Amino acid sequence: MQTDTGVEDHSKLKTIHVGSTHNLEELTLKGCYDLVELEMPSECLKLEELYLSHSKLRTLDLGLTPNLKRLNLENCYDLVEINTLAGYLKKLASLNLHCCGRFKSFVFKKQLDSDDEVGSLSELHLIAEPAYVWPLHCDNDSPKFQFSCYLKEDPASSFGNLERLISCTNLESFSKSIRSLQGIKKLTLEGSITEAPRDLDQLEYLEELTFSSTEIKYLPDSICKLKHLKSFKIKSCWLLEKLPDDIGRLESLETLILTECKLLSDILNSICRMKCIKYFHLPGCILVENLPRKIGLLQILKELNIEGTGVTRLPPSIFHLKGLHITDTCSVFC
């Protein structure tokens, strides 16, 4: 027997106890602007749809909801805690966290493209921005941030990555969650992020890593242990001062892009141990004046971009590389 529970828009209810409705399949509380407390059964095994937009809830305990397919928490500005068990949202197909708690937006895609192999889709893009005005309801003195999150995941997985991420409320909790994600192959971190997550080597399947417009000064050595990393991009991270000392351990790396890293001055010699690297770009790295002396060891290097750098002389070993295309803004000579 199907059980639906709904409350009309603009209700003045502040507290709702659903009770022991274990057969509940849909709960709709749209426009309950004064709702501050919702008590649900610890087990809602049949619940498929939950709509709680515009409420004043501060915490939400989803309990056991293994069949939940649609969750709408739009404009729940005060929501600071979402509790759910890892793997219990594996059937979720529609998620709306627009202006919910610390989330400016949260896009969750769980769709297998016909040309993609199972396990090839897992991707996370996280943007952190200062929250000068939004969210409106903040009562602590900690730094205020709002987050935009894009998560793409293999529908066959039951990693629990979604549950970990939607429970995050600040940069610290995101950092801890990111290094515990499973099956992620592509990770992009953007915006007002001051430190890269530690123990990134726990993302054992990671193939693409990008830092964009962050406030990171140093990168953890754990990055050097990513054995399957093929693409590493650092874009407009103006405060970055150096790369990890042992970056040459990235044995599978094919692409290294360092764009407008204005405080980066030293390109480490260990880069010359990257036997698989094909594309090495340094545009806008204005303090870089010298390339590694043994850069000629990068035997399959196809593209070198030193446009906007301080490089005026190329190491002699570079002329041993056949078919190398060099992009620069002035004539460089040995």
Image (spheres, rainbow, N blue to C red):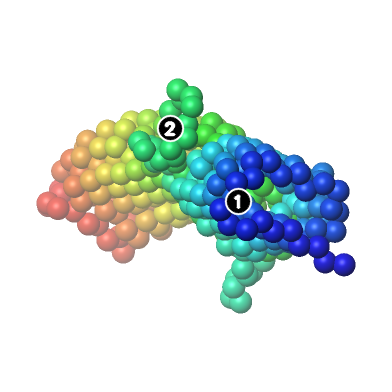
Q: Secondary structure at mark 2?
A: loop
**Label at residue 70:** none
Which residue is pictured at 60% across the width and 46% down the height?
12
Q: Is 300 situated left or right of 197 in this image?
A: left
Task: Name, please, the residue furthest toward the bottom.
Answer: 114
- For label 2, the residue is 144
Quick check: can you spot residue 34?
A: yes
Which residue is pictured at 22% across the width and 57% down the height?
327
Whether residue 273 is situated above or below residue 113 in the rendered picture? above
Instruction: Using the numbered discs, state the Cα–Cα distance from disc 1 to disc 2 in whole angstroms.
Output: 31 Å
The count of marks equals 2
Mark 2, Cα crowd under 10 Å, few <14 / some 14-19 / many 20+, is some
Q: Quadrant of residue 238?
A: top left
State the image coordinates of residue 20 (x, y, percent, origin top left). 86, 48
- For label 1, the residue is 11
Front residue of 155 and 327: 155
Whether residue 6 is situated above or below residue 114 in the rendered picture? above
State the image coordinates of residue 25 (x, y, percent, origin top left). 78, 61
Which residue is pictured at 27% across the width and 33% down the height?
263
Front position among marks 1 and 2: 1
Task: Name, please, the residue furthest toward the front.
Answer: 12
Looking at numbered disc 1 in the image, what kind of residue is underneath it?
A: Ser
State the image coordinates of residue 94 (x, y, percent, origin top left). 61, 62
Q: Is 204 situated left or right of 310 in this image?
A: right
Pick whichever of labels 1 and 2 is earlier in the sequence.
Answer: 1
